[in-house]
Amino acid sequence: MTTRLFHISDVHFGVEDRVALGHVERAIADEMPDALICTGDITQRAKHSEYKAAARWFESLGLPVILEPGNHDMPYYSPIERFTDPYRRYRRLERRVGSTIESDDVVLVSLKTTVRAQSRFPWSDGVITQRALADTLTQLSALRSDPRHIIVTGHHPLLGPPDRLDNPTIGGDDAFAAIAAAGADAILSGHVHVPFDDLRTHGAYAARLIGAGTLSTRLRHGAPPSYRVITCTRGKEIVTELRELGPSPR
């Protein structure tokens, strides 16, 4: 048995790349993957209209959808809602289109990397709270003897780029070490709009960090829109395929 997952991130509905989304739609229809994972920044400003557009698109795909919230998915123009119930709009989307996947090859574990406010500005980079990490580690503990691949999904990369000394994700170093020690094989994320797939170490612990690019018009560092195909087979190494798409004409 083999499980194939499409991994997308940072669609930013509101400034989405419709041509890139069309490529993903056709690939899903042609290849019928087992599930689609979207690791956050589903919307650009968390507007109701953007969430509605996202819901329509996810519903049109006809496969299980696993979602994570990103920093752009909390209200931008409604500070009261951001501080009192920042994930209300996201939860509504998740109830409408979100799903889970039952697989003999892989199990997915969520990690919340966003917070409603931070002590630094801007509030875009990740923060791993003790509560969020504890929730993830509790799930991983229950999977300690599970023979399937264990993949953690969240929005922000837990470690910075290999050539960067500081880590933009607060608490990311400790979270990476704890998650790797708990048996996770890989950690999926997005946020930076540049794809990566690296075996990283922190102290005595190692795990793969796998990042999808963006399917929006908000391109960075010359990286085109992209997504990943992740193939999981029990007892074999996780295989990933990066699919880069040319930027849409303006």
Image (cartoon, rainbow, N blue to C red):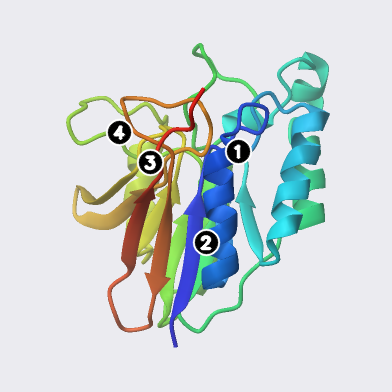
Spatial distance from mark 2 to mark 1, Cα to Cα? 14 Å
Left or right of 44 on screen, residue 82: right
Spatial distance from mark 4 to mark 3, Cα to Cα? 7 Å
Spatial distance from mark 2 to mark 4, Cα to Cα? 31 Å
Earlier sequence position, callout 4 versus callout 1: 1
**Crowd around label 3: few <14 · some 14–19 · many ≥20 (10 Å):** many
Res. 33 visible in picture: no
Q: Residue at point 36% right, 59% down?
A: 186
Earlier sequence position, callout 2 versus callout 3: 2
Task: State which mark lies toward you, 2 or 4.
Answer: 2
Q: Amino acid at mark 3?
A: Leu
Q: Amino acid at mark 2?
A: Ala
Residue topped by disc 1: 18
Residue topped by disc 2: 27
Name the image quarter holding residue 179.
bottom left
Residue topped by disc 3: 158
